[in-house]
Image: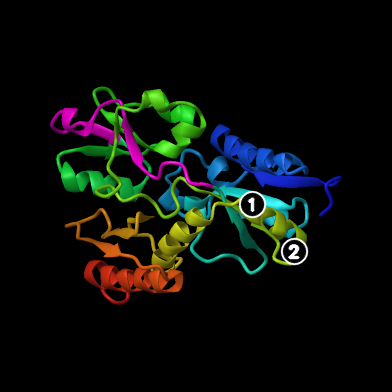
Amino acid sequence: MLPTEIIRIATRSSPQAWAQSTVVAEALISLGYAAELVPVETTGDRQADVPIHVIGGQGVFVKEVQRAVIDGRCDLAVHSAKDLPSTTLPELTIGAMMARRSPADALIGAKLHDLAEGATVASGSVRRRAQLARRRPDLKFIELRGNIAGRLSKIPPEGAIVMAVAALEILGLTDQIAEVLDPAQHVPAVGQGCVAVEARPDDHRLIEILQRIEDPATRCAVEVERAFLAELGSGCSLPVGAWSMHGTLHTFLASEDAGPTIYAGEVIALTDDHARNCELARRAAVTARTHVAGPQG
């Protein structure tokens, strides 16, 4: 990859995705390379009125973006790391994980303790619902989809919506936040707050360039979280979260919404050995899965 060539970056066209990809493009431009964004529509974008867990969960926002790189139409694919399935496609590699923004979730509309008995909270995430219900079993939940502006317009009367702080940060909308939820209690989605950049594994020159823009600490943290998710299996549809920070790994897994909800969570002390930390994450996943859904869950 020569400085005179244009690096084509595949991205969703939503304001959040475009802003994330612009950060990647600007980092490459600062190194002397030309870069342009190429918008790609995804299944998740086309079916904006259908709950994520109904249309396929993880992967619905990334498959078409990845295909643009695999087919050679683009050189890089940029995603929110939390949208990436736990197993990377053999035709791609994660060339960079950008410095992480806040991994936390936030309530918009009202603080948790200010919500009246039986108040309505809108969220399309089964994980967020399960965690909030654990603290406030009286709350009622409804679906929430669409771009950031659309979601902010759908705050239920006297209720709240739940969103990722990072999405609001990158769009300059943190003034909308009523309460940042403690990620130790409301464990974030795996990779939340991180932007991941994929490339073709045989594009060695471009991968070398990506190494210059990534944040090694973020990569280590997110890889540990992804080890937890990978052990659960790519088909796992249970509410799941993992957050690695300051030498600890917080994990969360819950049963399906229907019937009595069972929770599993650990706070694991990490070591200076990255491979060992990934193994600890995998073991935690085995324990959580056995507790929540049985050995075959």
285 versus 12 height, above or below: below
**Residue at horizontal 30 percent and vertical 59 percent from the top:** 251
Point 84% across, 47% down: residue: 5
Mark 1 surroundings: few (<14), some (14-19) or many (≥20) residues within 10 A: many
Residue 102 occupies quadrant: top left
The residue under label 2 is 204
Q: Report x, y in % for residue 48.
A: 50, 39
Seen in the picture, residue 216 relative to 176 is either above or below; the reply is below
Give the image location of residue 173, x and y in percent.
45, 26
Q: Would residue 288 be seen by someone viewing this image from the given angle?
A: yes
Residue 64 in the image: state x and y as whole percent: 64, 52
Helix, strand or loop for the magenta stretch, by majority: loop
Q: Residue furthest right?
A: 4
The magenta stretch spans residue 104: yes
Q: Nearer the viewer, residue 83 or 5?
A: 5
Q: Which residues are magenta?
A: 99-121
Farthest front residue? 272
In this figure, which residue is indicated by the disc labeled 1? 64
Q: Quadrant of the image for the N terminus?
A: bottom right
Q: Which image quarter: residue 248?
A: bottom left
Answer with left or right where residue 263 lies relative to residue 243: left
Check residue 203 in the rendering and tell me which mark sits there, or answer none.
Answer: none
Displayed quadrant of residue 208: bottom right
Image quadrant holding the C terminus, namely bottom left
Q: Is residue 147 visible?
A: no
> In the image, which is nearer the foreground, mark 2 or mark 1?
2
Front residue of 149 and 28: 28
Dot 2 or dot 1, earlier in sequence? 1
Please report the residue visible at 45 percent of the width from the left and 62 percent of the height from the top.
226
The span from disc 2 to disc 1 (Cα, nearest Å) is 23 Å
Task: Describe residue 68's horizontal placement relative to residue 122 as left or right.
Answer: right
